[in-house]
Amino acid sequence: MSPRVYDGPVTAPVTQEPTQVPSSGDSAAAPRGRSTAIGAGAFLLLAAPFVVFSLMMLNLKARTELRCDPGGPCTLLQFSWLGRELVGNFKLEELQGAAIERNRSSKKDAAPLYKPVLETTRGSFPLSSRWLEDEAQARNTVKVVNFFRANPLASRKGFILFHDHRRGPLIVGSSFGAVGGVLLGLSLWLAFKARRHLRAEQAARASSAPTP
């Protein structure tokens, strides 16, 4: 009796199941959302110093104002574009007059600078936030203050004198503020886009999750 030989296939043919390739939109949703959020944070960090410096410039007390009523008292104020500050109230007896301080630049042949100063029993207070190039302007300020001290009742309405140098801080502060505003706008726009991408990512994950 001859032995039986099995000449059939050893293993059954393997059927390959089709693999599901994720769409490019689903695979790019997550990194796109994260990268957009990072970009929004970067623009926010870039905008912060511009906004802070703009507020600092606009808050510079570059206007000095002296208000005197007939017979006193006198009020010394400093103004910025964002507010004002009271330097002090001075009675007529506290006023000792006004004088001019001179400051010569270290550069050769540079013109001297002048600053009117209010002299009081409490110390000296500048009547201008910066040095003046025009001596006549400083002398006129000193002349008005000294005339009031010698004749406090000469005017029925008193007087107000000021030196306003807020134009420079306004230009610089507005320029930096405009740049900071643009950067903030870009940051908000990117944050809105990041929110949309992250929501799309969550929706894609929920739809691809296997159902029990």
Image (cartoon, rainbow, N blue to C red):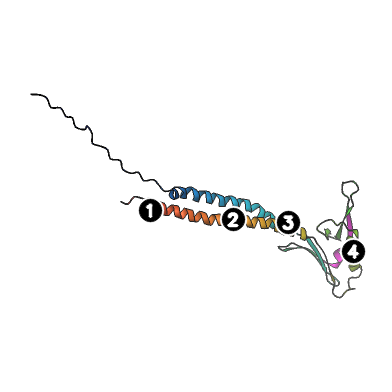
Q: Is residue 100 magenta?
A: yes
Local SS, label 1: helix
Dot 4 corresponds to which residue?
Answer: 140
Label 1 – label 2 distance at C-alpha: 32 Å
**Where does the magenta region start and end?**
90-101
Residue depicted at x 50% and y 55%? 195
Res. 37 mark: none
Q: Is residue 204 visible?
A: yes
Q: Determine contact: label 4, label 3, CB under 8 Å.
A: no
Q: Which residue is mark 3?
A: 172
Are the two marked residues, 1 and 2, in contact with CB atoms closer than 8 angstroms?
no
Q: Label 3 vs label 1: CA separation?
A: 53 Å
* Residue 90 in picture, x, y percent from top left: 82, 65
Q: Residues within 10 Å of mark 2 (few under 14, many from 20)?
A: some
Residue visible at 61% across and 56% down in the picture? 184
| Residue ID for mark 1 | 207
State which tag comes first along the sequence, 3 or 2. Answer: 3
Residue flagged by tag 1: what amino acid is it?
Answer: Ser
SS state under label 3: helix
Name the quadrant containing residue 157: bottom right
Q: Indicate which label's residue lies in the foreground, 4 or 2.
A: 2
Q: Residue at x 89, y 68 (%)?
A: 148
Question: In x, y percent, where is residue 169?
Answer: 75, 58
Residue at label 2? Answer: 186
Between 89 and 84, which is closer to the camera in this rendering?
84
Q: Nearer the viewer, residue 16 or 138?
A: 16
Marks 4 and 3, how far apart at CA? 29 Å
Within 10 Å of disc 3 (Cα), the crowding (few <14, some 14-19, many 20+) is: some
